[in-house]
Image (cartoon, rainbow, N blue to C red):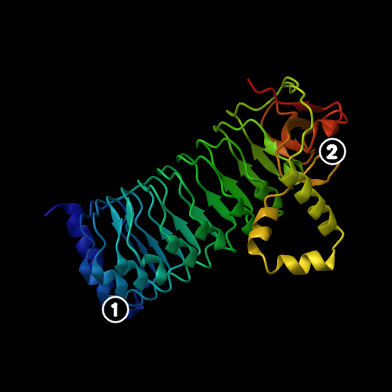
Amino acid sequence: MSPSKIMTERLLVTALKGGKNTKIITLIGKKIRKMPSTLGKLPGLRTLDLQNNLICKICPELSALTQLTLLNLGNNRLEELPEEMKGLISLKSLHLFGNKICRIAAGVFDGLQELMMLNLNDNRLTSLPQEVGRLKKLTRLSLNHNQLTTIPEELFSLRHLSELHLNYNQLMCIPEEIKLLRNLQQLSVVRNNLEGLPEGLCHLRKLRILDIAGNVIQTFPDGFQDLRLSEFYCEGNPLFLTQPNFATQHRDILTLREIATRCILLQLEEDHPLILEAMEYYPEIKDIFSQAKQCAICRKPFFSEWVECVQFVSLPKNWNASKNLQQIPLRILLCSYECFDQRDTNVFGVFEE
């Protein structure tokens, strides 16, 4: 028997002698290959730290640790989170970084109603289960260095989430529903495949740290400059740093649909009671109106993306931003070339080849 294994068994024997009074077990870097089943005899355990070992599976007896508040299984060889994990009903911090996890069994998150911190960095996840939305008390979620291509909409029901880390994945977009994370203070999406940021991001009034370095973003949504950021990093993005070419001008020819919908929207802005009441009976109309945009020049509503422009605004003084970033290129839309002719000198049309 190896010295490390002898030491491990001695520590477990000592813990078992303590019985229900044992609160903490720390076995870091002991070359443990299998979780000891004797853990099931320690129902009063609060902290279990087994990081930097060789553990491949989670033992069923773990579900007996109903008072456990911190579990660290980082840097092991786990490939799956089994359903037995849902028995940890008092767990607040779960560290699973540096494993080979590619599957999360259905129901795992059902019992983790007290979980506040989840670290799944450096694994092999290609997706998250919808059940992630059941972690209602979660405040910190870290999923760096995985293979995620999408973010499930259920994640945006985590209203207490303050930190979200998605660095080094394969995300191509962030859904508009991110605006529902009202308490989000830190968002990191470094080294993904993001081509832009959603307008919903501009509604996150508590956001203070935003790191989007290493994506393929050229412009930001209108309203981005109003965020109250203290730190902003965007190195490695092909931002518009110089003035793009003017857009080719065409005649303003509105379709009948566009004329009608604009007129209706203008009436709605005046809170016409009959129209508002009628909309309640026609969900398909409400769905159409939800796609309306506002012209950056005349501020009137429209549907067709008539002219796409870039507006350069000065970097807010209170932002601690990437070096050499002086201006923010905002993507704005105009309802017509008539408004395009009335633009400010810092607004430029995007030339489409």
Horizontal and vertical percent for residue 177?
60, 54
Q: Is residue 306 left or right of residue 160?
A: right
Label pair 2/1, CB-CB below 8 angstroms = no
Mark 1 is surrounded, within 10 Å at the Cα level, by few (under 14), some (14 to 19) or many (20 or more) other residues, namely some
Horizontal and vertical percent for residue 6?
17, 58
In this view, the residue farthest toward the bottom is: 20
Q: Is residue 42 left or right of residue 269?
A: left
The residue that label 2 is drawn on is 297
Q: Is residue 10 above or below residue 262?
A: below
Mark 2 is surrounded, within 10 Å at the Cα level, by few (under 14), some (14 to 19) or many (20 or more) other residues, namely some
Horizontal and vertical percent for residue 87?
35, 73
Query: Residue 19, located in which quarter of the rendered image?
Result: bottom left
Query: Residue at the spot x=88%, y=31% of the render?
Result: 342
Specify whether residue 189 is in view.
Answer: yes
- Secondary structure under the numbered disc 1 in the rendered image: helix
In primary-sequence order, the first of circles 2 and 1 is 1
Identify the image quadrant of the N terminus: bottom left
Q: Is residue 57 left or right of residue 205?
A: left
- Secondary structure under the numbered disc 2 in the rendered image: loop
The amino acid on which the numbered mark 1 sits, given as a three-letter code, is: Gly
Residue 308 or residue 344, whichever sits in front: 308
Query: Residue 109, located in which quarter of the rendered image?
Result: bottom left
The amino acid on which the numbered mark 2 sits, given as a three-letter code, is: Ile
Residue 209 or residue 273, whichever sits in front: 273
Find the distance from the CA under tag 2 to the CA under tag 1: 72 Å
Residue 12 or residue 184, whichever sits in front: 184
The residue that label 1 is drawn on is 19
Query: Residue at the spot x=35%, y=46% of the render?
Result: 124
Query: Residue at the spot x=36%, y=52% of the render?
Result: 74
Horizontal and vertical percent for residue 121?
42, 48
Q: Is residue 27 left or right of residue 192?
A: left
